[in-house]
Image (tube, rainbow, N blue to C red):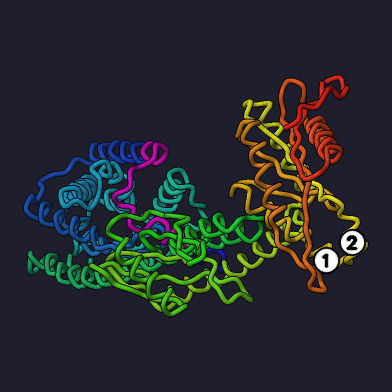
Amino acid sequence: MEGLAGTADRLLEDSWGDEDRRLDPRGAITEAGLTVAYLLTSLGLLLLSPPGDIPWLQLVSLGLAYAFASRVEFPVGAGHAVPTEIFLIPMLLLLPPSVVPLVVVGALALASFVDWLRGRSRLERIIETGGDAWHCMGPAAVFVAAGAPGPDEAQWWLYIAAFAAQVGVEVIVGTAREWLALGISPQLQLRVLGIVWAIDLMLLPVGVIGALAAQTFPAAPFALLGVAVVLALLAHDRNQRIDQAHERLQALQRERRRLQIAVHRIGDAFASKLDLDALLSITTRAAVEAIDADGGRAGAHQGVGRRLVRRATVHEDRDLEPALRAAEEAALERGDASVAMVGGVWALAAPVQASGSTRAAGMISAARREHAFLGEERELFVHLCEQAGVAAANIERHETLHRQALTDELTGLANHRRLQELLAQGVERHQRARTPLSLLLLDLDDFKAVNDSRGHQTGDLVLRAVADALRDCCRADDEPARYGGEELAVLIQDVDFTQAIALAERVRAAVAELELVDTEGERLQVTTSVGVAALGRDVADGQALIAAADQALYQAKRDGKNCVRYGSVQTGGEYPHLRLA
């Protein structure tokens, strides 16, 4: 039973407010079939028991009262219970019972048409009136079979038989209808119908009393409208409360979906090996969705002045920008999450600070119109930024380890492994787009003598100083490297060979001009020999480029050191004459 109760609750949640929903093809066919079958059965009953004199005033009045009562709806499962029983019994006793089914379906059609005029439902819903009216067919047939007795002639057993016939018809038609149209199981539908029958059974005596009173006071049945009005007020209050609960439920479901999306995004960010820009982008989207903001953005601190540079934007527009900027400025000043309101727009900003770091890696901000951020929304936003800070720390550690793996510890230049990666990338680019690529190889002159006579500490000092000079001479995009021992190297891309030779000469001169002292304070003169080569017709790949630059370097050594030489290597591997710089 608990399972059925839960299913009924879900049906109420899912079907509430569906009056304006279009019927699907399956439901439309089912409803149309039931309405046609109902009309044919009603006509058959009318032909079987032709009515005599019809009290048209009572027929119209009771029909209108029935139409009103049919719109007093108490939610029950996926449907509603309506207090139509208080007017159905007077109809059966005061009108020819064979016309009652047609009066009922006409009243329901009228009520459906009025709902359409009021914008409460679609006009196509009028085809449901036949299915809704089947409950009266059983009692009408019983009263026809009993000879259409009046209020003073009907016996108690007749009411019981009529009610039993009503239940029997609804068991067959109602369960088949919901199963065919909505796929609701008969077991669940019987549970819902049981509640409806209990309500009808309690209202049945009220209808009988109204019909009996009509013998003395013809307008007595219409006094029952007061009962219907009271029930309508109660139903309206209950429906309003359910409407409010349904809206809160939908809001909670939307919030849950937003949080699920946010959690998935953050999970993706933390599970992936992202750079800081990607982390900020994912976290910003997650934060905007989680706190139901209209837009947001993220920035990273870069440069000497730690300027905040835009890295991600989510639905940002000009209306949100002033509030976002104000919140970011407040957060920068305070070093903590801050809120700002500018021009009716509320904004929230918080730093993304890597754990263990004293400086924020970035900033995330979000803004929305209409209403301020609640306390729990601010807490969630700050929590997301804090978790992004954890991920930023992991990214920073990963980048540090990556740099260490590709950096020479002594000089701070790229190591041999990184040089090989750059060389492979440069060769591939040259082969694809014919971009120039040159290689400079530097070897410190008589460096072994420096180590032997001045000590290895002095040798390390010399290597660092030469590395700094090489770095100063290179462009910002170049990555000078320690090739091995006292040999340094730099790949020069996107410049012609003449410019590469000019750079080599600047490096040679810069090293020669270094003013160094050893560990004992004595002056030390250092020079370097440089070999230069470039990819071209005779130098087809990376190994050939290294061989050509190396051969030019040896030629510089043979020519007296402290000079620049350049050369080439033929594809066949033979070394031709070296052209001297």
Residue that lies at the very extreme toward the right in this rendered image: 452
Q: Quadrant of the C terminus?
A: top right
Q: Secondary structure at mark 2?
A: helix
Q: Earlier in the sequence, mark 1 or mark 2?
A: 2
Residue 494 quadrant: top right
**Label placed on residue 509:** none
Query: Residue 442 at what x, y percent from top left?
Result: 78, 45
Q: What secondary structure predominates along the stretch shown in magenta?
A: helix
Looking at the image, which is closer to me, 191 or 415? 415
- Give the Cα separation between the discs numbered 1 and 2: 7 Å
Residue for badge 2 = 451
Looking at the image, which is closer to me, 417 or 174? 417
Mark 2 Cα within 10 Å, few/some/many (few <14, many 20+)?
A: some
Which residues, given as a range, are shown in magenta? 10-29
Q: What residue is at 44 percent from the left and 53 percent from the top?
A: 171
Query: Residue 292 at what x, y percent from top left?
Result: 40, 63
Amino acid type at mark 1: Thr
Residue for badge 1 = 458
Looking at the image, which is closer to me, 540 or 60? 540
Amino acid type at mark 2: Asn
* Relative vertical location of residue 156 with respect to residue 189 in this rendering, above or below: below
Q: Is residue 16 magenta?
A: yes
* Relative vertical location of residue 360 with respect to residue 104 in this rendering, above or below: below
Residue 409 visible in this rendered orientation of the protein: no
Q: Is 195 positioned to the left or the right of 425 in the image?
A: left
Query: Residue 524 at what x, y percent from top left?
Result: 79, 62
Label 1–label 2 contact, CB within 8 A = yes
Q: Is residue 169 magenta?
A: no
Q: Is 284 positioned to the left or the right of 105 in the image?
A: right
Mark 1 Cα within 10 Å, few/some/many (few <14, many 20+)?
A: many
